[in-house]
């Protein structure tokens, strides 16, 4: 396995503060992402404190677990790690969701670093890059175009 990167971004017609208010809650991904099931936070942990684990389940079956690694609300970003078992054969998958000033609007960058083989890269690009990150950024463009 080799180190890999994945990134999707978009510019939104909103201030960074407005965008962060919509996406900055680690436990609230399903509030704005149309393809994500609501999550629960394990052990009633505080979703703003590193170490919290969000769990996604479908029909009572856990499909994903993610641990908050770090969060900086002043800089408007948080990073998290996918916990085993991961749906694809990757390792050390760490993602960051960040809001940056961009002229007089905001840029959202959703990125990840991970270990994977050449064969898994297209699957990661499709599942996470397009299906999760891209779909979420599309939803944000729609949300902030209506504001």
Image (cartoon, rainbow, N blue to C red):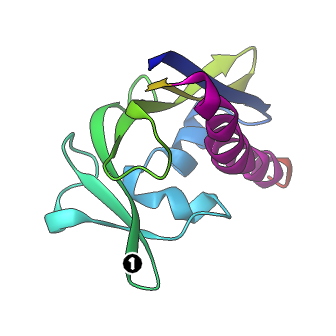
Query: Residue 112: where, in percent of width, then height?
Result: 51, 27
Q: Quadrant of residue 128?
A: top right
Please state the horizontal and vertical placement of residue 107, each as a whole percent of the image. 68, 26
Left or right of 34, for residue 59? left
**Residue drawn at (17%, 59%) of the image:** 45
Sort mark 1 into few (<14), some (14-19) or many (20+) by Cα contacts within 10 Å.
Answer: few
Region rendered in magenta: 117-144
User: In x, y percent, where is residue 8?
Assistant: 69, 29
Q: Position of residue 120 (x, y in %)?
A: 59, 34
Residue 78 can be seen, yes or no: no
Q: Is residue 31 left or right of residue 141?
A: left
Residue, far bottom: 59
| Residue occupying image coordinates x 21% and y 39% | 50
- Which is nearer the eye, 65 or 96? 65
Residue denoted by label 1? 61
Where 38 sits versus 86, above or below?
below
Name which quarter of the figure residue 46 lies in: bottom left
Please identify the dominant SS of the magenta region: helix
Residue located 38% across and 84% down the image = 60
- Residue 88 within the segment the image draws in magenta: no
Residue 102 against residue 130 in the figure, above or below: above
Number of marks drawn? 1
Whether residue 129 is situated above or below residue 136 in the rendered picture: above
Q: Secondary structure at mark 1?
A: strand
52 displayed left or right of 146: left
Q: Which residue is painted at 50% across and 46% down in the image?
A: 88
Observer-nearest of 140 and 54: 54
Q: Nearer the viewer, residue 26 or 132?
A: 132
Q: Is residue 83 visible?
A: yes
Q: Quadrant of residue 69?
A: top left
């Amino acid at each position: 396995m080799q180190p890999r990167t994945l990134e999707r971004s978009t510019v939104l017609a909103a201030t960074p503060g407005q965008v962060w208010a919509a996406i900055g809650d680690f436990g609230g991904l399903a509030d704005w992402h149309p393809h994500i099931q609501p999550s629960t936070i394990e052990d009633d942990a505080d979703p703003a404190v590193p170490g919290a684990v969000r769990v996604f389940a479908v029909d009572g079956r856990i499909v994903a677990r993610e641990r908050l690694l770090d969060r900086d609300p002043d800089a408007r970003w948080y990073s998290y790690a996918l916990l085993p078992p991961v749906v694809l054969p990757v390792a050390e998958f760490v993602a960051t969701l960040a809001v940056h000033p961009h002229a007089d609007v905001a840029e959202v960058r959703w990125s990840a670093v991970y270990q994977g083989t050449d064969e898994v890269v297209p699957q990661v690009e499709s599942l996470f890059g397009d299906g999760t990150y891209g779909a979420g950024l599309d939803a944000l463009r729609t949300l902030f175009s209506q504001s």
